[in-house]
Amino acid sequence: MNRLYQSNSFSIAYDIAGIGTPVVLLHGFGEDATIFQHQKDFLKGKCKLIALNLPGTGNSIVDYSTANATVEYLAEVVNELLNHLEIEKCILLGHSMGGYITLAFAELFPDKLMSFGLIHSTAFADCEEKKINRLKGIDIMKEYGAAAFLKTTFPNLFSNEFKKTQHPLLETLISQFSYITTDACVYYYQAMIARTDKTNLLRTAAVPVLFVIGEEDIAAPMADVLQQAYLPAVSYVHILKNVGHMSMVEAPEKLNAILEEFILFSK
């Protein structure tokens, strides 16, 4: 990342490019902003694009002893960066955990959003079974390390076809994010466990909401997200066939076209 914003308790590394409508990309768990490389290359000439590494990824840092492990805290971090950049309104697009942060941001700072998008994400809180599985995941990460955990779980985020035909790329992605520390991954899991249901926020959303759904997504299942897609007054819903949880790399051209259309509509 080319720029760094330093706060008292955290720092945020980010890239900013282009002019026009501010669009912010928030990555998910076990990733950093490079997961959006195809989108960054495509969109930077069409808007003012801000892609950031959340605290704990890349050279973005946070003091885990003082930072609240909540998506609300991470939304406040994003807001502080926007204040630093003097951005009064933006389009916020979050992938997976980035979508949870997007929803928290929409609840805390609704006047700062022109629209927002959930890319393979959900407004549902974790069910009890999911919380138990995340707690087991934390135990595994603490015992074997985050890199080993991601190597085992990351392939499950992709469609069967992608895993069969794009194995070298999958291995590259696993290696690319293997640097993310156990402390960071545990922190993110704790934040995801603590999050609350945000479906009522969708019901009352005063701005357009984008839903990008993978037909083979097991992390944000299509059946779950479709229950939410009708809640906002204005929804844009896109279902991608033969795609899992990672359309940014599984179907980049399709996702790029979806995002471009949504950005143009939101202006």
Image (tube, rainbow, N blue to C red):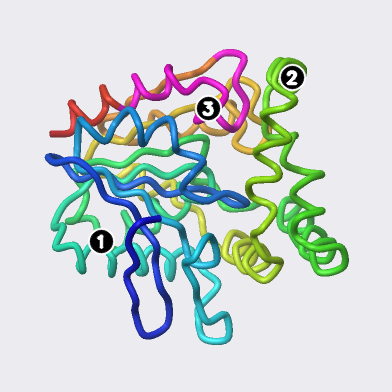
Horizontal arrangement in the rendering, residue 158 relative to residue 105 (left or right): right
> How far from the left and from the top, in percent, is residue 130?
72, 51
User: What crowding class fits label 3: few (fewer than 14 Cα within 10 Å), some (14-19), or many (20 or more)?
Assistant: many
Q: Which mark is first along the chain, 3 or 2?
A: 2
Check the image and report above or below for 12 versus 153: below
Asked which quadrant contains residue 132, the reply is bottom right
> How far from the left and from the top, in percent, is residue 203?
34, 42
Which residue lies under the disc numbered 3?
Answer: 247
Return the residue nearer the eye: 262 or 127.
262
Give the quarter of the figure containing the C terminus: top left
Q: Amino acid at mark 3?
A: Ser
Per the image, label 3 sits on a secondary structure element best described as: helix
Which residue lies under the disc numbered 2?
Answer: 160
Give the quarter of the figure containing the N terminus: bottom left
Residue stretch rendered in magenta on the structure: 241-259
Per the image, label 1 sits on a secondary structure element best described as: loop
C-alpha distance separating marks 1 and 3: 27 Å
Horizontal arrangement in the rendering, residue 155 relative to residue 62 (left or right): right
C-alpha distance separating marks 2 and 3: 13 Å
Q: Amino acid at mark 1?
A: Phe
Which residue lies under the disc numbered 1?
Answer: 109
Q: Amino acid at mark 2?
A: Asn
Residue at 72% in and 27% down: 168
Return the residue nearer the eye: 256 or 232.
256
